[in-house]
Image (spheres, grey):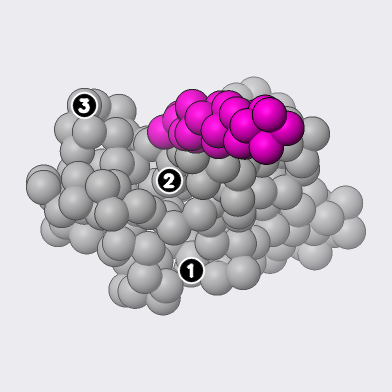
Amino acid sequence: MTSHTTLHRTISFTADAKLAPPPSSDSRMSSGKTGRRRRSSSIIYQEPPETVEQISDQAVNPNLNSQWVNAKGAWTIHPVIILGLKIVYDIIPGMTQEISWTLVNITYMTGSYLMFHWVRGVPFEFNAGAYDHLNMWEQIDNGDQYTPAKKFLLTVPIVLFLLSTHYTHYDLTYFIINFLALMAVVLPKLPFAHRMRFAPFSGALPDE
């Protein structure tokens, strides 16, 4: 009788073990995403590489959001904007050349930063959101560094800074202001900052 009782308990334990539910697909997915999860308190976050699905979606249609930088006449718009800003600021009564050039420099740098580094994704629906995690600078030329378009976009703010420094007669106060504005748009364009997100300067960062 003792052996029969022992056998019965052994069978009951084995049956209970077989009834244990397998791990759900949701738990496997959540554990797989653990490596890509970012704490909300993080200041620096690096965007992970695209998944196979995102790469496939990006290849469906050309990226109209970034291709225009290589179009004919696209480079001309930058000196035209700078000249237009200079004319607008110069017609303000009491405006000095030092302040005018500094305002032109700050205005252009601010617009450049917002367009190329702050806003992510595309303004229209296509490619199933495959570019929603990338800013325009990272979308240009499929993320390749030092292409002709990126070299031009890196050169323009440097030349504008040199002009602003010259026409402000190398005044230290104006120099510091213009230099800080230059660094705000040059540093995000360098390879070390590719796909890097800095919480105060990159908008809302994703939680995953």
- The Cα atoms of the two marked residues, 1 and 2, are separated by 22 Å
Q: Earlier in the sequence, mark 3 or mark 1?
A: 3
Residue 134: mark: 2
User: Residue at the location (48% across, 68% down)?
Assistant: 155
* Residue 161 percent across, percent down from the top left: 63, 60
- Nearer to us in this view, 9 or 66: 9
Residue 155: mark: 1
Task: Name the side, left or right, on which 85 lies relative to 43.
Answer: left
Q: Secondary structure of the magenta portion, mostly?
A: helix
- Nearer to us in this view, 55 or 108: 55
Tell me which segment is drawn in magenta: 1-27
Amino acid type of disc 3?
Glu
| Dot 3 crowding, Cα within 10 Å, few <14, some 14–19, many 20+ | few
How many discs mark residues in the rendered view?
3
Magenta segment includes 188: no
> Residue 192 lies in what quarter of the image?
bottom right
Q: Is residue 39 visible?
A: yes
Identify the residue position indicated by label 3 in the image: 125
- Nearer to us in this view, 73 or 82: 73
Please, is residue 62 above or below residue 5 in the view? below
**SS label for mark 3:** loop
Amino acid type of disc 2?
Leu
Please, is residue 128 above or below residue 164 in the view? above
Amino acid type of disc 1?
Thr
* Residue 64 percent across, percent down from the top left: 18, 43
- The Cα atoms of the two marked residues, 3 and 1, are separated by 32 Å
User: Residue at the location (22% across, 60% down)?
Assistant: 70
